[in-house]
Image (tube, grey):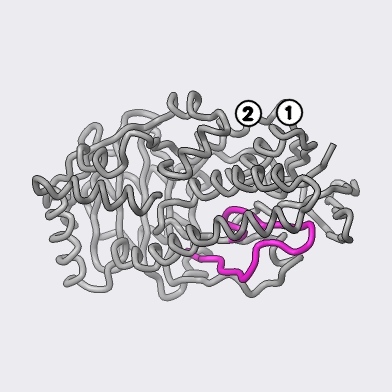
Amino acid sequence: MKRAVIVGAGIAGLATALRLHQDGWQILVAERAPARRSSGYMVNLIGPGYDAAERLSLISALTAADLGLFTTVLVHADGRPKFTVPSAIAEAALGKRALSVFRGDLESCLFDAVRDRVDIRFGTTVTSVDQDTDHVRVELSDGTIEQADLLVGADGVHSATRTAVFGPDFRVDLPYLVAAFPLTHPVPGVPESSATTYIGPGRTAAMVNLGPERSSAFFTYRSAEPAADLERGPVDALRAAFGDLSGGVPDAIDHLAKDPASAYFDAVSQVVMPRWSTGRVVLLGDAAWCVTLFAGHGAALALAGADHLGAALRRHADDLPAALAEWETGLRPEVSKRQALARRGMAQYAPPSRFHVWMSDLTIRAITLPGISGLVRRGIERANR
């Protein structure tokens, strides 16, 4: 029986654990957090991400958590509506094979699928890694020493595995911050089954009202000093960046003030590496190729990356270098495309000027015109192939 140690119990790590377990691998997952984290933002599973979820037998559980489609209302700074984008536009763009879920619900589905099948150790980190041609030797903070056929670093954009094995120079920090958090109850001013979105120079604020326990807020903005804003914490940073807005924004931030730990709050970075593996150590998900939230495909790529890795390892059961090489060659073009789209998407979420906001409004308005939504759908279908 082959054995893998996986670092990180997020989407990428749990999906890899599930995929390899399905092929008979013995799995140990080491997660530095003391317990599972349930916060997060909305993720769309379309294209390869939906296909991977299907092959991992997750569709039934994820369908129960599907948030469905909703109307989006673009608003002014004071909350007055600009114009409405009907949910039918999103339906035409995403197609039938699509799911929208909270990141925490996706992690829960994966965790439930593996919790009784693999060894998951919370509050545990990797303290040293050594490898030769036959095995990788991993020392953990709980004092155990594990010998495995493969070490998978799935520990996110700030990956300690990447730094320890590959070096520290692959993260590209960008001058933006992102905050996303659940809302126990919808905030005032956001119609039911809809989202209100303010897009202004250098920032976006969006509140989604899908009912109690199904609502959320999303903020992103350009920052001259991301590290200083992180030090301030999400509540003070968001009040400084968005305190002049109305239309539910103050209520959402006040809601966060009651539980600041519920927010995903981080600087925006991409990870760009010449290769994702060395010997018997491979990186997967944000640890290897973080595309940023601006790309909108991070969770889908994590699922697809785990699924494709398992398939390559099965095809090349006795040749690990060949398996990892084939896996990376097949996946890298999609990752590169998504990273490039994310860099262009920054102008959409944090427009450089009022002129760019105006141009973005014109583009979104045009998408709502009769006949245009079909062109959008076909374009997105081509992009997701």
Q: Is residue 65 above or below residue 379?
A: above
- Mark number displayed over residue 378: none
* Residue extending farthest left: 370
Q: In this view, does 125 lie above or below 63?
A: below
Going by the numbered disc 2, the residue's amino acid type is Ala
Q: Do the residues labelled 2 and 1 touch (CB within 8 Å)?
A: yes
Magenta residues, start to end:
268-288
Residue 283 occupies quadrant: bottom right
**What residue lies at 47% left-to-right and 69% top-to-bottom?**
226
Whether residue 188 can be seen here? no
Residue 234 in picture, x, y percent from top left: 46, 56
Residue 315 in picture, x, y percent from top left: 69, 44
Q: In this view, does 72 lie above or below 220?
A: above
For mark 1, does the 10 Å Cα neighbourhood hold few (<14), some (14 to 19), or many (20 or more) residues? some
Q: What residue is shown with label 1? A: 117
Question: For this view, does 373 lie left or right of residue 10?
Answer: left
Q: In this figure, what is the number of numbered marks? A: 2
**What residue lies at 35% left-to-right and 36% top-to-bottom?**
215
Residue 41 in picture, x, y percent from top left: 44, 45
Whether residue 52 can be seen here? yes
- Mark number displayed over residue 113: 2
Q: Is residue 54 magenta?
A: no
Q: Is residue 275 magenta?
A: yes
